[in-house]
């Protein structure tokens, strides 16, 4: 069992996945900052200064030391917008990578046209002249 685990852990796919998780975490922070610091303030300004992250529905008011029970639907809206932006960003990134791959594959699969030597060109001209005389 240890041998199988070692083979699994040392495969290239596992390392690629680990790198993707780290990059994805960093990318998520960048997108969250984009949403929190740039997009949501603009949306808030367009909607009359509403800050979505503080929108909530109070189910039970606070009593003494017991905090209020709230339904934080604003945080949910914020998370949904984060998700949509992250998903769209990843889609655009993968679309760009696929386009670059297709261009490279098309360039690699193009058959190279062999350069015709001067002698071959001369022989082709002679052949064409002989055909015209017949």
Image (tube, rainbow, N blue to C red):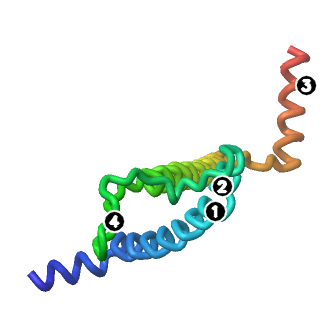
Q: Which residue is mark 3?
A: 129
| SS for dot 4 | loop
Marks 2 and 4, how far apart in space?
32 Å
The image quadrant where one finds the N terminus is: bottom left
Q: Position of residue 25 (x, y in %)?
A: 47, 71
Kindly state the secondary structure of the residue where label 1 is placed. Answer: helix
- Which quarter of the image is occupied by the C terminus? top right
Which residue is at 39% across, 75% downward?
A: 18
Q: Is residue 35 visible?
A: yes
Specify few, some or many for label 1: CA neighbours under 10 Å numbering under 14, 14-19, or 20 or more: some
**Does the CB distance between marks 1 and 2 fall below 8 Å?**
yes
How far separated are the C-alphas under marks 1 and 2?
Answer: 6 Å
Q: Nearer the viewer, residue 119 or 112?
A: 112
For label 4, the residue is 62
Asked whether 62 or 54 is in front, the reply is 62
Residue with the most extreme top position: 134
Q: Earlier in the sequence, mark 4 or mark 1?
A: 1
Horizontal side of 26 relative to 37 (left or right) equals left
Tell which circle, 2 or 3, labels the residue nearer the N-terminal end.
Answer: 2
Asked whether the viewer can see residue 105, the reply is: no
Image position of 8 with respect to 122: above or below: below
Residue found 89% across the figure and 33% down from its top = 125
Q: Relative to 123, does residue 14 appear above or below in the rendering?
A: below
The image shows residue 113 at horizontal and vertical percentages of 73, 45
Q: Give the side of residue 11 with respect to residue 105, left or right.
A: left
Q: Label 2 to label 3, Cα distance in Å?
A: 73 Å
First-in-chain label (1 vs 3): 1
Residue behind mark 2: 39
Find disc 1 in the rendering and name its residue.
34
């Amino acid at each position: 069992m240890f041998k199988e685990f070692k083979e699994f852990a040392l495969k290239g796919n596992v390392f690629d996945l680990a790198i993707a998780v780290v990059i994805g975490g960093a990318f998520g922070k960048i997108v969250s900052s984009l949403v929190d610091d740039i997009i949501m303030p603009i949306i808030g300004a367009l909607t009359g200064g509403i800050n979505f992250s503080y929108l909530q529905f109070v189910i039970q008011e606070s009593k003494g030391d017991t905090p209020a029970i709230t339904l934080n639907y604003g945080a949910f809206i914020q998370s949904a917008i984060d998700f949509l932006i992250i998903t769209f960003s990843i889609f655009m990134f993968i679309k760009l990578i696929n386009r670059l791959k297709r261009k490279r594959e098309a360039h690699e699969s193009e058959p190279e046209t062999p350069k015709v030597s001067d002698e071959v060109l001369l022989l082709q001209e002679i052949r064409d002249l002989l055909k015209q005389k017949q």
